[in-house]
Image: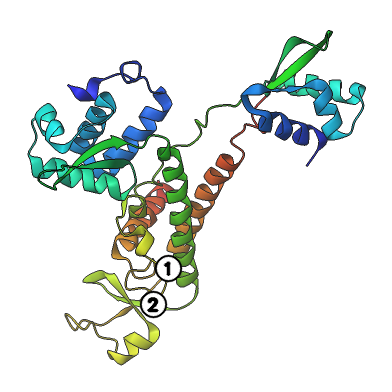
Amino acid sequence: MSLDEKAYEIIKAAGKEGILQSELWKKLGISSREGARIVSRLEKRGLIERKRVIHNGRRTYRVFALIKEESQIQWDTLEGCPCFTCHDLYRCGSGNPLSPELCEKMTKWLMKLVDKFKDSETS
Amino acid sequence: MLARMSSEELNINPELLSLLSAVILDIGGKAALDVVLALLKKKEATDEELVQMLKMKANEVRKILYLLHNYNIAIYRRVRDEETGWYTYFWRINLENIKDLVIRRKREVLKKLKERLEYERSGNYYYCPNHNLKRYKFEEAMENYFECPVCKSPLVPFDNSQMIKVLEIMISKLEKDLESVRSTAAWHAPR
């Protein structure tokens, strides 16, 4: 893990509270000069946010992670793979009465895909 | 009418709602989605209330609730009637769980596909042209004198090289998908 990644993990772990820059430097064991560079890099990438605060009478920054919504999670059933909606998914396994090896639903799906790939190759 | 409800009305993140709808439609169809949306709107409801809201048959509503409960999408809290000793079930939707559910299911499916790939790679298979979903290992085919036990037509070798190829494509697709979930924090997000 690079230093940037480590820093990001620490900021993320701080959650909504965020973390003071100085605390971040301490945790990473780096100088404020190095730290400032890391933080500004992360900020440019839109991963974190800095807010100006006054701490012990000194002006400093508190950094917050901008956690992106896990929007990448999609319900993609791989062109109709029956397993995704199979009620027996967690009972199915090699050697069991229900197994991916002998599952006819899966065979059907695979055959369909094979045909489809053949078609797209010939056309 | 319920299907037209917007994410604002329900106060749910639109992406989460569309993910939820896609999942529900696939596992339970339109009726299940109606039940889910009604539950989201009302936050918590008994099966009777749902029957009234949706004008559906009570057994249908319950069937859907049990199905959703199986997937841990619908959860309930039950209250015992002191006098009769009967339980009343209050159902609600376990929204926080939906992303986990999708990820867990994807991981499980990946496992199954890998097992299948292993199987396809590990031997020679025969099949009957009339019953082409059932396949026989070499030994099984031999025991049946290379005849279909059902219709007695000769068994033919099954060329599964295409099937292996398809499986490999799908496995790598799913792996890539799960990979992106692991780095959800958008570490590799475009700058």
Q: In this view, does B157 lie above or below B68?
A: below
Asked where in the image residue B90 lies, by quadrant, the reply is top left
In the rendered structure, the answer to whether residue A101 lies left or right of residue A25 reads: left
Q: Is residue B162 visible?
A: no
For disc 2, the chain is B
* Residue depicted at x 23% and y 82%: B148
Q: How far apart are marks 2 and 1 (CA)?
A: 8 Å
Q: Where is residue B176 in the image (x, y as percent from the top left)?
A: 56, 46
> Which residue: 37% across, 46% down?
A79
Q: To which quarter of the image does residue A89 belong?
A: bottom left
Q: Whole-percent x and y of residue B93? A: 31, 35
Mark 2, residue position: B125
Above or below, B85 relative to A97 = above
- Say which quadrant the N terminus of chain A sits in: top right
Q: Do labels 2 and 1 share a chain?
A: yes
How is the protein colored in the picture?
A: rainbow
* Image position of A122 with respect to B76: above or below: below
Q: Which of marks 2 and 1 is nearer the N terminus?
A: 2
Residue sitting at 40 percent across and 39 percent down? B98
The one nearer the camera, A109 or A54, is A54
| Residue at the far front in the pictured view | B83
Q: Residue B39 carries which label?
A: none
Q: Are marks 2 and 1 in contact (CB under 8 Å)?
A: yes
Q: Where is residue A50 in the image (x, y as percent from the top left)?
A: 72, 15
**Element assignment for label 1:** loop
Residue B160: mark: 1
Task: State the SS at label 2.
Answer: strand
Question: At x 7% / y 39%, what residue is drawn?
Answer: B57
From the image, which quarter does the C terminus of chain A lie in? top left
